[in-house]
Amino acid sequence: MSLRNSARHLGVCLFAGAALLCSPSLWAQVTPAEGYTAPDDTPTVKVGGTIFTDYTYTDEPTTLDVDGNTVHPTAFDVKRAYINVTGTLHHLVGFRITPDIVRESGSGGNVDGSLTFRLKYAYGQFNLDDAWSKGSWVRLGLQQTPYVDFMEGIYRYRFQGAIFEDAEKFMTSSDAGVSLHYNFPGGYGDLHSGYYNGDGYSKADPNDQKAVQIRATLRPVPNGGIIKGLRLTAFYDADHYAQDDSRTRFVGNLTFEHKYINVGGDYLKASDRPTAASPEVKAQGWSVWATPRSTKGWEGLLRWDSLKPDKDVDAKKERKIAGVAYWFPTQKPAAASLLLDYERVTYGDPLPSPDGKRYALHALFNF
């Protein structure tokens, strides 16, 4: 069976599984045992928000102002502003709606350059806690993709910048589709698989091609003291630009979480053929990071990304980040942090972009 037909078959299976798991027969009422407490099915709605804001000084590259003077650009900016509306309609049915801001550009209208809202998440969720393990579910709609959201739960510096694979545009954090999440019993890990449009929430789906994405994570020793923070992850994305023009991604990942440090390492392989007349381009790269921290709210950030956009061309793009953050003592899910960081991006010949160097003060507010 071809990869394309396999992807479509898995997508059909996901739809069929969602229908089966959410069928009335599966959730039929049973006679409760003595002492049984019925779940609360009262509808609920919660409203929260997230703000990423910063001040950035760009040392390289410089630019010219309207008078021809060489200047180092500086700017206050709001990189993200979410309004999160979440809730439940039943203990088995939930939802989320999240608009996000984006900088308008190229419209030529009076909003050109403005921050405008777009939709990032809008999905319904069918909880499978009663049938499977707690934390298992099916989602329908515009939702998180399996890998990016998972990693951002461990690497909590999205307010500084996206994770390696997202920053280099190899994957997106949100897309429309259907997905299934299953938690392995005993805390040994989880599985998240989905059938998506494939082009992300910021683009319209151009044709009939769909993406099959799957992430499997293993926690080898969930009750093993310090080593319980170790997780091994594999992710695969099978997609097509058009019928015979493949687009695939594979990521292998290792993370370790501890009271005093989180560390992680990714290895990426990607293959792209945008059109039938285009040669297949294979990229590969890696990212390693560490966030040592104290019990007083102070935390460091160290990260090094390395990418070969075409493995047959001896040219690399590298990103190095170093920073220090203070996390205010808030109660979850609220969070507030300030981060002062330095970022250096270099491009080897013959990559066309100029090298970059910047200093920034970032702030996170989550409520």
Image (tube, rainbow, N blue to C red):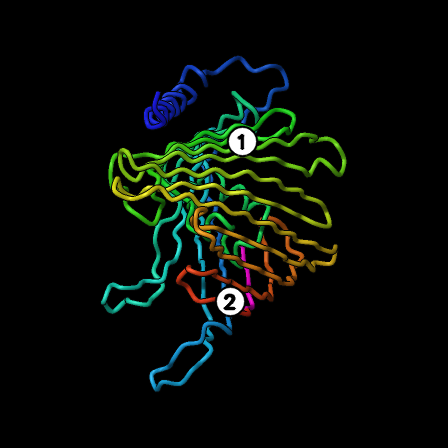
Chain part drawn in magenta: 360-367
Using the image, determine if residue 93 lies above or below residue 267: above
Q: Residue at x 37, y 81 (%)?
A: 65
Please tell me whether residue 82 belongs to the stretch shown in magenta. Answer: no
Q: Dot 2: few (<14), some (14–19), or many (≥20) neighbours within 10 Å? A: some
Q: In the image, is residue 52 above or below residue 94?
A: below
- In front of the other: label 1 or label 2? 1
Residue 166: where, in percent of width, then height? 46, 49
Name the residue located 27 percent from the left edge and 37 percent from the top edge.
242
Task: Name the image quarter holding the N terminus.
Answer: top left
Report how many numbered discs are placed on residues in the image: 2
Q: Position of residue 50 (x, y in %)?
A: 49, 55
Residue picked out by circle 2: 54
**Vertical position of residue 105 compared to residue 8: above or below:** below
Q: Nearer the viewer, residue 349 or 304?
A: 349
Is 115 or 360 nearer to us in this picture? 360
- Does the image show residue 173? no
Q: Indicate the secondary structure of the residue bearing disc 2.
A: strand
Q: Amino acid at mark 2?
A: Asp
Task: Report x, y in % for residue 161.
Answer: 51, 57
The answer to which quarter of the image holds residue 209 is: top left
Q: Residues within 10 Å of mark 1 (few under 14, many from 20)?
A: some
Residue 306: numbered disc? none
Q: Residue furthest right?
A: 225
**Residue 216 numbered tag:** 1
